[in-house]
């Protein structure tokens, strides 16, 4: 199946501002920050899970600060893509706000007016930002008192940005590693079609590796990591088998 577009040029979406020359657009009621509400509840649960002695008020207070650390990192990751695109003079078409979170929109992912190097620079902006934020978070954690609110926030920021700066580089279409590999191949002389075929083969091997990693993580009690790896494995196999495709 083809990857469904998150926004089309003729959609009746409303622009609510611009960031780095890119319009922020909302459509219908999907602007509602549902993600923030869900993640706040999850972070409250995690605060109690890690420290059962915390009362409800403490868990809610911690979640109020850790939720922005998680979702703010994701916002920053996407805005870094917009900044990189603007810096090279090839801004993205839009950022759609869906349930409180940003989605980067390119109407034509194979736009031949954008050079392969420019495609790569647009894609690498997010991982670079997450890597820098990871280093800052590690430094903050190092100097934060144990069992303090700042340590809790730093721990969450470290975990979130470690995830974003590594997983985003997997060579899967739709996340940053896919375009980086694809346009690196095109820059070296492959056609777009040949590069897409290479990625399908790479994702087949990646799916197998992620499946083994998922099984190992779950067997060691790391269920969250195991389930995330399993989801990425399914996505990789979908790309490898041609069930999931980017824009034709």
Image (cartoon, grey):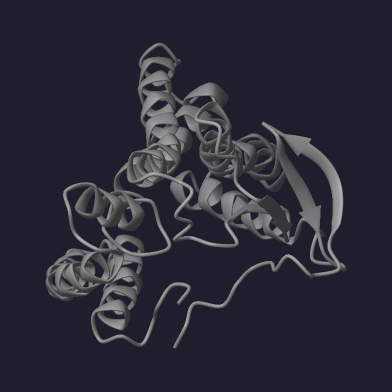
Question: In the rendered image, which quarter is residue 236 located in?
Answer: bottom left
Left or right, 188 with respect to 183, comes to left
Residue 25 locus on image (x, y percent): 78, 53
Where is 132 relative to 236, above or below? Answer: above
- In which quadrant will I find the N terminus? bottom left
Residue 71 locus on image (x, y percent): 60, 44
Q: Which residue is drawn at 17% across and 64% down?
A: 220
Q: Residue at x 45, y 15 (%)?
A: 144
Where is 126 relative to 206, above or below? Answer: above
Where is 133 relative to 126, above or below? Answer: above
- In which quadrant will I find the C terminus? bottom left
Question: In the rendered image, which quarter is residue 70 located in?
Answer: top right
Where is 68 relative to 214, above or below? Answer: above
Left or right, 165 with respect to 105, comes to left
Residue 230 locus on image (x, y percent): 29, 73
Left or right, 62 with respect to 46, comes to right
In the image, 68 versus 22, the foreground residue is: 22
Residue 164 locus on image (x, y percent): 40, 45
Q: Residue at x 15, y 74 (%)?
A: 201
Question: In the rendered image, which quarter is residue 129 located in?
Answer: top left
């Amino acid at each position: 199946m083809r990857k469904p577009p998150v926004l089309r040029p003729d959609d009746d979406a409303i622009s609510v501002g611009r960031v780095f020359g890119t319009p922020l657009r909302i459509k219908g009621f999907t602007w509602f920050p549902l993600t923030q509400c869900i993640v706040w509840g999850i972070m409250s649960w995690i605060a109690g899970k890690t420290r059962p002695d915390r009362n409800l008020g403490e868990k809610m207070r911690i979640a109020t600060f850790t939720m922005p650390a998680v979702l703010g990192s994701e916002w920053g990751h996407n805005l870094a893509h917009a900044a990189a695109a603007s810096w090279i003079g090839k801004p993205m078409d839009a950022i759609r706000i869906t349930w409180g979170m940003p989605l980067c929109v390119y109407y034509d992912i194979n736009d031949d007016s954008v050079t392969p190097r420019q495609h790569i620079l647009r894609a690498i902006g997010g991982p670079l930002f997450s890597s820098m934020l990871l280093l800052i978070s590690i430094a903050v954690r190092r100097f934060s008192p144990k069992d303090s609110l700042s340590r809790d926030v730093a721990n969450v920021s470290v975990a979130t940005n470690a995830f974003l700066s590594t997983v985003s580089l997997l060579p899967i279409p739709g996340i940053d590693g896919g375009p980086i590999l694809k346009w690196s191949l095109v820059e070296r002389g492959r056609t777009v079609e040949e590069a897409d075929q290479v990625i399908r083969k790479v994702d087949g091997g990646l799916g197998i590796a992620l499946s083994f990693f998922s099984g190992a993580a779950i067997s060691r009690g790391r269920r969250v990591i195991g389930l995330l790896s399993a989801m990425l494995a399914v996505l990789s196999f979908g790309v490898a088998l041609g069930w999931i495709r980017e824009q034709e």
